[in-house]
Image (spheres, coloured by chain):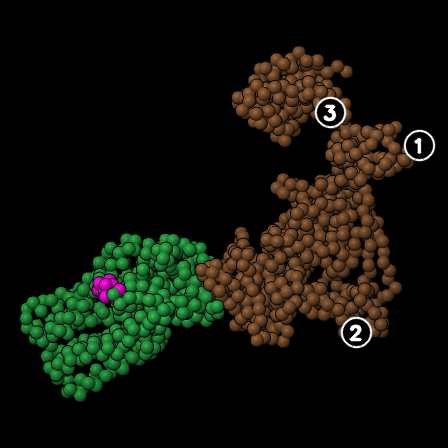
């Protein structure tokens, strides 16, 4: 017997949900959703769980990750209960539930704390540069070294344990029996969805958005690969240099479009932006743009006189790697693809 | 007088003529005795045929008319009107139904249908041969109306009747007027209080000289009939002088040693034997509840206004019409129904509304502060078993409004609604939306799986298999459980028995026709309105009150009434007064009278409806029904059997 917990609704409001209490359970949202199926029907059920405060049911559910926020549900909701934004908020909330450090919860709920985190990192970068006597060569060298360390430790200490926690909540805690073979055969699902977000094509009229998102992911992974593994800033190979340029251009062009959507608020999915949404897209934009300019300055020999530019890029990079990737919106890249993977291996 | 009869046989487009050979019907009656003309027509009810009928009657001096067409329910009145337009008494018209009774019933057998139609027409002709002109009875109708019940419906009806120039006697059983509405504080959708509504109405009532208000009064007998009801009213005094000393009276109330359950607060509080329900109540003088008063004399010592010498009065009045607005009782749950009378924190919605009003700042009941409130809907309404199968209409809205009001008035309130589907119809829907937005939680189950109230370690748990959450078992720890009770008929409806008012299956008073005659009853001259007729909210009650006022006024406005002449008639010679007819009469229209030598039955013409129930029980065959006499019926049977 589950006890009703009206406090949960108030908690969700801190993650951006609002007015979902207005739901009178007509089910229009579920009926219009092009991704909802008989076996995995949403979002009404998730709205209902949220209203009643059924945390355990939400924690063990993959449904929030199965939604790609086309916004049809919110557009058609007769009570203006915004089921789409509720699903978004549930994803934010789940992110913090998976996170063993609980830091993401703090950052999602408190903008001041997030800003303080960003400032501390900026100061840290400055202090480190001062200790290096603002020597560009050594700063760039250590910067590159930092990237490798950061990726490995963020993944090893935070993201991997969080994925395991997600697996525990979804598969182990509800005692779902999954044969080992399924983990292996289903692995393709993980890779496909991680790199293509194929499922979001199921949303109505989503081809353009899917394409933008797709090349953004390619651009981001490409830039990561180019800078970290090919050491773009120190590499003289023409192919690598051009590759880096292309990847960084893709990132800041696509993010400009995403930012303009959030400013215009015409699409349902861009109407309600939380600080975490803004930070994610703005930092991605800044990362692409500053990387592009840094390389441009290297190629034109201006970087020695404009060392501040690299320091700015480095600050953005460290903030991205230490805040947004482990505790911010970046994680949806992992959780969405793992959700599809778990859904696949759970199914009969 | 020899009859000169016209017969019209209708094709009804093809509804009749597709199966009945109308020409053959025509030929087979053409040469019958008294037949002057027989015509067939495509549509007898059509304007052209009606005009032709009028011409035929006037030119040829017809004195008997038969139309063979559809059911008399559809067109009896139409063709009676045709004969009247041709200056022929309408009772010289007889209707034969050859559509429902012949063509439609025997569509598989055309010759049989035709034969049936012929006999039906011949029977109608047999009856019209014996038809006599009849004229309505005219009786006097006293221009005065008694309104029984001084709630919002009765008050509003009285004001309306008064404005139409009709003297009104307004009779209220309680010592204070306003009925249920005075018990409610804020009312939904208008944001007024019940007291404000009652105050407005009361001030209008006392302004009008042609309204006589009797409080503490009950009708104890009624004789007579439409146009002349003679009522006896028993009036219990207040035992307080009219111009009383207010300050001293309050002292007297404080001094009274008797405490009884306060029915105004649905027994959640007590009151003294000398009391008023709230300070600005109307009439403003307090009352001594003489049934519970011990005559200790404490109040008399303090206040000179107390007057035990006042006596019960019997008032006799005569009115042309009676308007019933006796209201409803709130359903009282049976012992243990959802924990009622079993757990002390289970109350009904009316009690809850009083609790909200009686508390300020903090919501406290039985010494405990209330935070979590569970509302269980449809208690005493929409029941699978028992009598209350109906929806009480007002309760969803009222409960939701109370829940919103509670959240607005007090802090940290959580509302949980255990429903069977919400019915906040019409403009009230906004309240449902508002309560949802305020975070009220709604759970729902079917009638066969209601919520359960239990206690565990001093805590009250309400649980439900919520159909909105795949029938998951959900539970709430409630500080207060509110049973959203519906409306039931008054437990003491003795006044209705005086008028023999019929009740429906739901035990509320019944109208004649739900849609077309919504405030009339089969008892001529008695109208009904408000919640005595069935669950209604205030708006609907007042709507029906205005409607009943207009209808009651129509009975008395002219001073005379015309009544249908088709009634029973006693043959004085044959009657031996056995009383069986009086027992059989559903309208109480037959009484014994003394004739020259013997006792005989007499029909009250203004009450008799001509139903014919008395005819077959008469052992000496002394009763005949005008226009349906034995002779007429026998001649029809002969024609049908021929």
Magenta stretch: dominant SS? helix
How many numbered markers are drawn? 3
Badge 1 or badge 3: first in the primary sequence: 1
Q: Which chain is mark 2 on?
A: B
| Residue plotted at (68% across, 23% down) | B94
Find disc 3 in the rendering and name its residue.
Answer: B633
Residue B43 seen in this snapshot: no
| Residue plotted at (32% across, 73% down) | A165
Residue A185 belongs to the span the image colors magenta: yes
State if disc 3 and disc 1 touch (CB < 8 Å): no
First to last magenta residue range: A182-191
Lateral position of residue B104 relative to residue A63, left or right: right
**Which element is circle 3 on?**
helix
| Residue plotted at (52% across, 72% down) | B412
How many neighbours does mark 3 have within 10 angstroms: few (below 14), some (14-19), or many (20 or more)?
some
Chain drawn in brown: B
Residue B304 belongs to the span the image colors magenta: no
Closest to the observer, A103 or A342: A342
**Which element is circle 2 on?**
loop
In the image, residue A160 lies at what x, y percent? Answer: 26, 74
Find disc 2 in the rendering and name its residue.
Answer: B257
How many neighbours does mark 2 have within 10 angstroms: few (below 14), some (14-19), or many (20 or more)?
some
Badge 2 or badge 3: first in the primary sequence: 2
| Residues at marks 2 and 3, CA–CA distance in whole angstroms | 73 Å
Instruction: Quarter of the image for the C terminus of chain B: give it.
Output: top right
| Residues at marks 1 and 2, CA–CA distance in whole angstroms | 64 Å
Q: Which mark is residue B596?
A: 1
In the image, residue A338 lies at what x, y percent? Answer: 27, 67
Q: Which chain is mark 3 on?
A: B
In the image, residue A332 lies at what x, y percent? Answer: 28, 68
Of badges 1 and 2, nearer the viewer stands 1
């Amino acid at each position: 017997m589950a006890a009703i917990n009206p406090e949960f609704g108030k908690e969700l409001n801190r993650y951006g949900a609002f007015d979902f209490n207005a739901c009178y359970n007509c089910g229009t949202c579920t009926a219009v959703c092009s991704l909802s199926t008989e076996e995995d029907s949403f979002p009404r059920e998730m709205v209902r769980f949220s209203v009643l405060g059924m945390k355990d049911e939400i924690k063990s559910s993959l449904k929030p990750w199965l939604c790609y926020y086309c916004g049809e549900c919110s557009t058609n909701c007769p009570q203006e209960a915004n089921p789409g934004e509720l699903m978004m908020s549930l994803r934010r909330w789940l992110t913090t539930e998976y996170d063993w450090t609980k830091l993401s919860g703090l950052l999602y709920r408190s903008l001041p704390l997030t800003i303080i985190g960003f400032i501390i990192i900026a100061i840290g970068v400055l202090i480190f540069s001062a200790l290096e006597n603002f020597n560009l060569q050594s700063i760039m060298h250590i910067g590159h070294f930092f990237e490798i360390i950061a990726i490995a430790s963020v993944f090893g200490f935070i993201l991997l344990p969080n994925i395991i926690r997600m697996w525990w909540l979804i598969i182990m805690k509800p005692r779902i029996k999954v044969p080992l073979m399924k983990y292996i055969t289903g692995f393709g699902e993980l890779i496909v969805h991680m790199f293509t977000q194929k499922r979001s094509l199921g949303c109505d009229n989503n081809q353009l958005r899917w394409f933008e998102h797709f090349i953004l992911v390619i651009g981001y992974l490409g830039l990561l690969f180019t800078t970290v593994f090919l050491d773009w800033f120190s590499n003289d190979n023409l192919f690598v240099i051009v590759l880096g340029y292309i990847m960084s251009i893709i990132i800041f062009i696509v993010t400009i479009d995403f930012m303009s959507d959030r400013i215009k608020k015409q699409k349902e999915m861009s109407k309600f932006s939380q600080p975490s949404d803004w930070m994610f897209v703005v930092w991605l934009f800044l990362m692409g743009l500053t990387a592009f300019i840094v390389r441009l300055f290297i190629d034109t020999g201006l970087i020695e006189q404009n060392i501040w530019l690299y320091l700015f890029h480095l600050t953005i990079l460290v903030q991205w790697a230490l805040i947004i990737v482990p505790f911010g919106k970046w994680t949806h890249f992992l959780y969405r693809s793992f959700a599809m993977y778990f859904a696949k291996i759970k199914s009969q | 007088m020899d009859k000169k009869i016209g017969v019209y046989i209708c094709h009804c487009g093809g509804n009749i003529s597709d199966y009945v050979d109308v020409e053959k019907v025509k030929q087979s009656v053409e040469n019958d005795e008294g037949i002057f003309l027989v015509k067939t027509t495509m549509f007898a009810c059509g304007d052209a045929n009606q005009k032709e009928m009028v011409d035929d009657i006037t030119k040829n001096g017809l004195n008997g008319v038969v139309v063979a067409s559809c059911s008399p329910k559809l067109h009896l009145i139409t063709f009676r009107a045709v004969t009247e337009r041709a200056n022929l008494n309408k009772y010289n018209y007889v209707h034969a139904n050859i559509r429902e009774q012949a063509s439609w019933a025997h569509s598989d057998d055309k010759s049989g249908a035709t034969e049936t139609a012929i006999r039906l027409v011949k029977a109608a002709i047999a009856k019209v041969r014996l038809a006599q002109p009849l004229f309505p009875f005219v009786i006097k109708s006293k221009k005065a109306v008694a309104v029984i019940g001084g709630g919002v419906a009765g008050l509003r009806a009285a004001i309306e009747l008064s404005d139409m120039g009709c003297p009104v006697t307004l009779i209220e059983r309680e010592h204070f007027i306003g009925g249920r509405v005075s018990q409610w504080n804020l009312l939904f959708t208008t944001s007024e209080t019940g007291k404000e509504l009652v105050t407005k109405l009361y001030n209008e009532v006392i302004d009008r000289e042609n309204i006589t208000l009797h409080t503490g009064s009950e009708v104890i007998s009624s004789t007579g009939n439409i146009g002349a009801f003679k009522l006896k009213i028993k009036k219990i005094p207040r035992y307080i002088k009219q111009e009383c000393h207010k300050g001293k009276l309050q002292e007297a109330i404080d001094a009274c040693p008797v405490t009884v359950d306060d029915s105004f607060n649905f027994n959640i509080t007590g009151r003294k034997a000398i009391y008023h329900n709230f300070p600005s109540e109307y009439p403003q003088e307090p009352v001594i509840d003489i049934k519970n008063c011990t005559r200790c004399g404490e109040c008399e010592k303090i206040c000179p206004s107390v007057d035990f010498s006042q006596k019960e009065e019997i008032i006799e009045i005569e009115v042309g019409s009676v308007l019933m607005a006796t209201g409803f009782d709130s359903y009282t749950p049976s012992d243990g129904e959802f924990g009622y009378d079993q757990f002390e924190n289970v109350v009904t919605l009316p009690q809850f509304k009083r609790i909200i009003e009686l508390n300020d700042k903090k919501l406290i009941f039985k010494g405990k502060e209330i935070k979590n409130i569970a509302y269980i809907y449809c208690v005493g309404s929409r029941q699978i078993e028992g009598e209350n199968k109906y929806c009480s209409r007002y309760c969803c809205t009222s409960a939701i409004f109370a829940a919103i009001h509670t959240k607005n008035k007090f802090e940290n309130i959580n509302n949980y609604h255990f429903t069977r589907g919400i019915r906040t119809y019409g403009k009230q829907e906004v309240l449902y939306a508002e309560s949802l937005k305020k975070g009220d939680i709604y759970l729902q189950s079917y009638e066969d799986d209601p919520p359960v109230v239990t206690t565990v370690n001093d805590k009250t748990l309400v649980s439900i298999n919520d159909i909105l959450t795949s029938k998951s078992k959900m539970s709430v720890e409630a500080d207060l459980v509110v049973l959203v009770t519906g409306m039931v008929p008054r437990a003491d409806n003795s006044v209705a028995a005086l008028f023999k008012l019929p009740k429906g299956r739901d035990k509320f008073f019944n109208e004649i026709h739900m849609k077309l005659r919504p405030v009339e009853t089969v008892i001529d001259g008695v109208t009904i309105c408000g919640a005595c007729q069935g669950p209604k909210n205030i708006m609907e009650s007042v709507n029906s009150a205005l409607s009943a006022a207009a209808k009651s006024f129509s009975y008395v406005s002219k001073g005379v009434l015309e009544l249908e002449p088709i009634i029973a008639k006693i043959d004085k010679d044959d009657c031996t007064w056995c009383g069986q007819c009086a027992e059989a009469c559903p309208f109480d229209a037959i009484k014994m009278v003394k004739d020259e030598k013997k006792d005989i039955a007499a029909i009250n013409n203004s009450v008799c409806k001509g139903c014919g129930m008395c005819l077959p029980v008469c052992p000496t065959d002394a009763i005949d029904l005008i226009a349906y006499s034995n002779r007429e019926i026998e001649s029809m049977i002969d024609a049908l059997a021929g």
